[in-house]
Image (tube, helix red, strand yellow):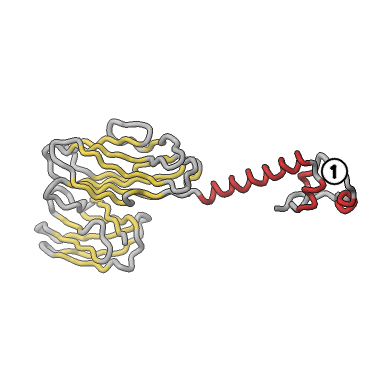
Amino acid sequence: MFLNARSYNWPECLSSNSVCVCPKTCFDVALYTADMLLCCRKADAMKFLASVFFLLSGLYSLSGQTFSPLPGPVLEKEVAFGQANECYIFFDNPSGDSLQLRWRLISESKPPEWIIDLCDYGLCYTGIPPSGTMNPVFDTIQPYLKLIVQPGDTPGAAWLWFNVFEKDNPDNSLDVYFSLHTPGTSTTASPQNGSFRAFPNPASEVLFFENNTSASERLMLVNASGNKYWEQILAPGERQSIDIHTFPTGVYFWVYSGQTRPILIQR
């Protein structure tokens, strides 16, 4: 570890049998060596080591802090009619260091009759606000996002996309998704009238589109940055398959008739 250096007569100091008294500018020495420790007073040497340790530990915490979603980035769950269904995504903190997470809602698609409230590790909300901050955690405690989903007697499917990140280090972030559906309903994020379908969702190798309307329709598949990956006009009743095994993993959107629906590609 290199600092601004000054010239000290270390050999002369080391030749003495007495313990040398360090100058006040001891910490200006260019290179941390055993010679410097011998020449510094014990107290100054301990202070120096503590400073080095504090700096290194701080650098580690900035670069090495990670967390991961449990059971995974996508929670697929069937929600029961007439109940308040609790749907959790936890966040594992394997380092055991202190961790405080924030989150923001990126996208939400659900039947209008459904009631969905959100709780995080700290607060519960009525509905889902645009963003929030969780309480800090320590050791092996796992913060979480929890949705309380009340579909009533309305069949359908919901898709919610959140970005979760470390409060003081927003580059340490990940995306998580809730893919929810009632019994007998596909988890595709299709409109309720069933005019178009995209499945499976999430997808990994092949993605299917169906046009169940009486008119031809142009469909597009774009990524989160708006880059177009596929476009085609589907005739009434036509089903089209797309080989997506070379597409990068992530969230995509299929666009039709002025509507946009999310699709997750994962492997």
Image-based side of 166 in relation to 252, left or right: right
Q: Residue furthest front?
A: 17
- 257 over 234 or under it: above or below: above
Tell me the residue that label 1 is attached to.
Answer: 19
Q: In front here: 241 or 176?
A: 176
Q: Residue at x 82, y 47 (%)?
A: 39
Image-based side of 45 in relation to 177, left or right: right
Image-based side of 258 in relation to 44, left or right: left
- Image quarter of the C terminus: bottom left
- Give x and y (percent) for residue 185: 14, 50
Q: Which element type, helix, strand or loop, lies under badge 1?
A: loop
Mark 1: give few (<14), some (14-19) or many (20+) Cα within 10 Å: few
The reply to whether residue 247 is visible in this rendering is yes
What amino acid does circle 1 point to? Val
Q: Residue at x 27, y 55 (%)?
A: 263
Q: In front here: 66 or 151?
A: 66
The reply to whether residue 172 is visible in this rendering is no
- Give x and y (percent) for residue 112: 19, 39
- Give x and y (percent) for residue 54: 63, 43
Q: Residue at x 52, y 51 (%)?
A: 64
Q: Residue at x 39, y 36 (%)?
A: 132
Residue 111, quarter of the rendered image: top left
Image-based side of 207 in relation to 249, left or right: left
